[in-house]
Image (cartoon, grey):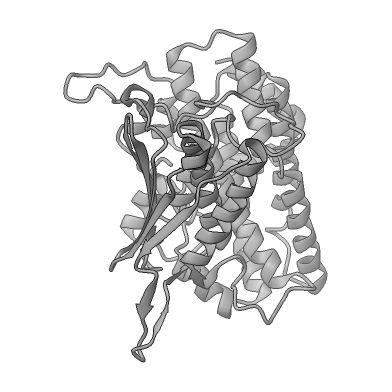
Amino acid sequence: MHLTAVTRNLNKLLDMKSMKLLDHYAQFNPSPLSLKQFIEFGKTATEAESFSFLSKEIPVRLSNIMKEINLLPGNLLHMPSLLILQDWYAKSFRDLSIFESQKPTPDTLEEFCSILKTVQTRHTNVVQTMAQGVLELKESHIVDNQTDMAIQYFLDRFYMSRISIRMLMNQHVLLFEQDADKTSRRIGIIDPNCKVRSVIVEAFTNAAFLCEEYYSRAPDIEIKGQLKVTNDKGKKIPLSLVYPPPHLYHIMFELFKNSMRATVENHDISELPPIEVLVAKGEHDVSIRISDQGGGIPRHITDHLFHYLFSTAPRPSMTPNKAPLAGYGYGLPLSRLYARYFHGDLILNSYDGYGTDAVVYLKTQTHEANELLPIFNKTSTRQYKSAVPIADWTDPSFCVNRGPNPRGNGKNRNSVNTTAEDQQNTAATA
């Protein structure tokens, strides 16, 4: 790892004052929020209070992941796309770190909101740019198993960090920008009454449209289970939960694309079996199972399905003329991150020769739906330096990503109330 050269590169992107600020903020752990806190904060907090929290918290989250980027193998860090990415993060850190010492005057609040929008726009293509950087490395270097495992470990943490930072910025902008919709029932991007069936149908419809563009046909859908629940007045109402609809849509859309492609490619066009969706709500989880008859996936391949850049479909161009149905190898791992972000999960069960079940779990209770955040500490640092673990016969599928979750040992920069369990959750890998 050519850390000296990389650090010199970071010195070119940040001046001495910014470098000291980066080191300062990196001492602190991010402060995870629950959906309950997001909702309460959105209902009661003033713009000045939001500014006070975010002007500290976002630089903490940026500095943590920027420090971790520095631990990547030097040859990856010197790929053209990674240099561009580092430049974006350096500019955003520099733009936002100046606000901590400022008072929340009307002019400062307006400028802060404007800078958040600028950062959002600047980071629009972060996912694709990081993916391109890894591709550049694999096309120009031989990537050994240890390096690949370190990259996979990092990408989960990097993309989860991005999800969390965008969540914070979206909440502030949507709540406090000058033309914010004050009449919306949503609190930022969170819908206190997110209708599960509606999101499922929207995601299916759009995935079916894409499937029909490629194959001229798409499977139908059958939705069953607890689609309605009884409210306090004894009336049946659509099943809903507190959740950001864009996150749920992203997960469902990716899963439907996979199921549709498998179904169409494994059946006669005139006899496509439907994709079955089961919805269930319990005390702690809303569960959504998507079942297809797309032929299933061999067991030796299923372990790789959540690896970035792995796909069972041919890889399309990074700049396609139309949206690809599959092939980048980012759909499943990113969808799992979105599910895990608020302590849900995404699990695949495949039956080779028949089909696949994808099960999404989402927290029912808002106080249990805490952000799952990566933090930069000695434990995470060791993941990039340790030798590849040797699997023993009791767990032949063991890898770094399934090892013990690193526990945080830093300080929280903001005075947000978090339990000991929250802090352990914070340190968990994505």
The residue lying furthest to the front in this view is 270
Residue 287 placement, left or right of 102 = left
In the image, 44 versus 328, the foreground residue is 328
Image coordinates of residue 137 in percent, x first then y, are 62, 16
The answer, for residue 157, to whether it is visible in the render is: no
Image coordinates of residue 170 in percent, x first then y, are 65, 60
Residue 106 placement, left or right of 390 = right
Residue 97 placement, left or right of 409 = right
Q: Residue at x 51, y 75 (%)?
A: 40
- Quadrant where the C terminus sits is top left
Image coordinates of residue 246 in percent, x first then y, are 58, 58
- Quadrant where the N terminus sits is top right
Question: Which of the 4 image quadrants contains residue 285?
Answer: bottom left
Question: Which of the 4 image quadrants contains residue 69?
Answer: top right
The answer, for residue 253, to whether it is visible in the render is: yes
The residue lying furthest to the bottom in this view is 233
Image coordinates of residue 145 in percent, x first then y, are 43, 14
Relative to 89, does residue 395 appear above or below in the rendering? above
Q: Residue at x 37, y 51 (%)?
A: 425
In the image, 277 versus 348, the foreground residue is 277
Relative to 262, does residue 367 appear above or below in the rendering? below
The residue lying furthest to the left in this view is 394
In the image, 368 versus 30, the foreground residue is 368
- How many labels sit on residues? 0
Question: Which of the 4 image quadrants contains residue 100?
Answer: bottom right
Relative to 233, does residue 382 appear above or below in the rendering? above
Q: Residue at x 61, y 45 (%)?
A: 62
